[in-house]
Image (cartoon, rainbow, N blue to C red):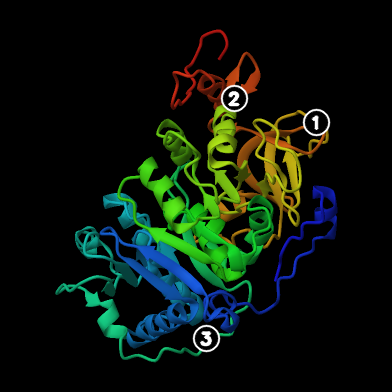
Amino acid sequence: MTRLRNLGSYDQSRKAFCWDVPEYFNLFRASVGNPAYANRLCLRHLGDGGEVADWSFAQMAAASSKLAGLFDQLDASVDARVGIFLSQCPEVIMGHMACAMSGRIALPLFSLFRGEALAYRLDNSGAEIVICDLENLPHILALRDRLPHLGHILLTDGDHTDAVNMHRSMANLPGSYDVVNSRSDDPCLIIYTSGTTGAPKGALHAQRLVLGHMPAVDMAFEFPKAEDAIFWTPADWAWIGGLYDLLMPALLMGATTISRRFKKFEAQKAFQLMKEQGVTHAFLPPTAIKMMRQDTPSGSPPHRGLQAVISGGEALSGELLDWGEEILQVAINELYGQTECNLILANSGALFQHKQGSVGRIVPGHDLVLLDDEGKIIATPLVTGQVAVKSPDPVMMLGYWNNPDATKDKFQDGYWLTGDYAHRDEEGYFYFDGRRDDLMSVAGYRIGPSEIEDCLLGHPAVGMVAVVGLPDPIKG
């Protein structure tokens, strides 16, 4: 398995690292279906009413196999796209594993998607099956006439005349499955981009995607030991952050994950969950960290068992990082990536000192450069350029779903163009300056909103802030 070793320093660990991506690889076989993990606790699911459901890896493997068999029974195409329209719950894992083992393609969908956002992704992907619960079923039924490819709706928690009761239908199916002999580059996942620059595009990822994430996971989570680790994130598992920054790597390691559906994130409940469940490794999105800082319990630190916390999505202010060390009692390791090419920069308190404002250093195994406006590599420190990643790369998408032109536009001379701008200091630390469409040109200088936001957040009266540019007749 592709893992990063802690050799005492970043330079030594990076020098010793090499990819180990086999020609044949199946996500299910390597994770939930790994016989070495059979008796370990795979998932602890916390219900809304306080109920607790524990799933061993063997139980999750059997349920996933039954679901894969149900896909076959429903005559789903060999490469059918399967929408997973659920909040955190065991059935999300079953859906992804059933797709991986049967050669189908999982399509995670945010449980808060409605109307056009939902319709576009289901129609564009040609989804044949959707897995959902009773709460979200009406949103699928309202779109059914617009989705000619959708053949079956699998309902996880009840009955409806227009849906299939998933658990009842798979109850008598075999708890084992003839897993496809998939290649590492065979597709198994489509995650749609946010659509900040035009219509959302479906990033098609391969079975190997989880292997591409592991060096960054080891680095930012500071080399977790699976037998002692308990992972949790409040992030939706439909986002690549919640899904592949935490859930899938934890499954690959044979570690325990905690799941709970938060209809609305509440800081006090997050602190309580981490303490009661003994969470050791957490992925906390920036918004969650800001809310937890504003509602920190008084007295002693609310949870002393954390070993590592990671965050990504936007830069954290110095005040938030200081709060993490004081209250969470660990450094918050920021990292950077995209839906199409995730976790390529990261911090790691185990390997090097943090620097305020930096999203970290290059994760071993990835080849990153900064390009100027003419596509030339910038060798000079402290000069802003577009972040580009050498292709191929195990964490990089196969391409945009049914969109070869958009895929072609993102590559230049063998590099994936992120559209994000950053600069690098003399020690190789990267600092995010903004997206191409976020950067403001002021009197000829490129200015990113994040550094202004960071400054404003330094004032004790400011809880959250967003900076946008307005046209000026003189400065632009």
Q: Quick one: 7 or 414, which is closer to the camera?
A: 7
Q: Considering depth in this image, is 374 or 60 the residue closer to the camera?
A: 60
Amino acid at pointer 3: Val
Dot label at residue 179: 3
What x and y, as percent, mark residue 472? 51, 11
Say which amino acid is labelled 2.
Glu
Count residues near mark 3 (Cα–Cα under 10 Å), then give few for <14, some for 14-19, many for 20+. some
Q: Which residue is mark 1?
A: 381
Image quadrant where one finds the N terminus: bottom right
> Mark 2 highlights which residue?
451
Q: Residue at x 51, y 52 (%)?
A: 241
- Label 3 – label 1 distance at C-alpha: 49 Å
Q: If the image is split into quadrants, where does the C terminus sit?
A: top right
- Whether residue 252 is visible to the viewer of this picture, yes or no, is yes
Q: Residues within 10 Å of mark 1 (few under 14, many from 20)?
A: some
Which corner quadrant of the image does residue 353 belong to? top right
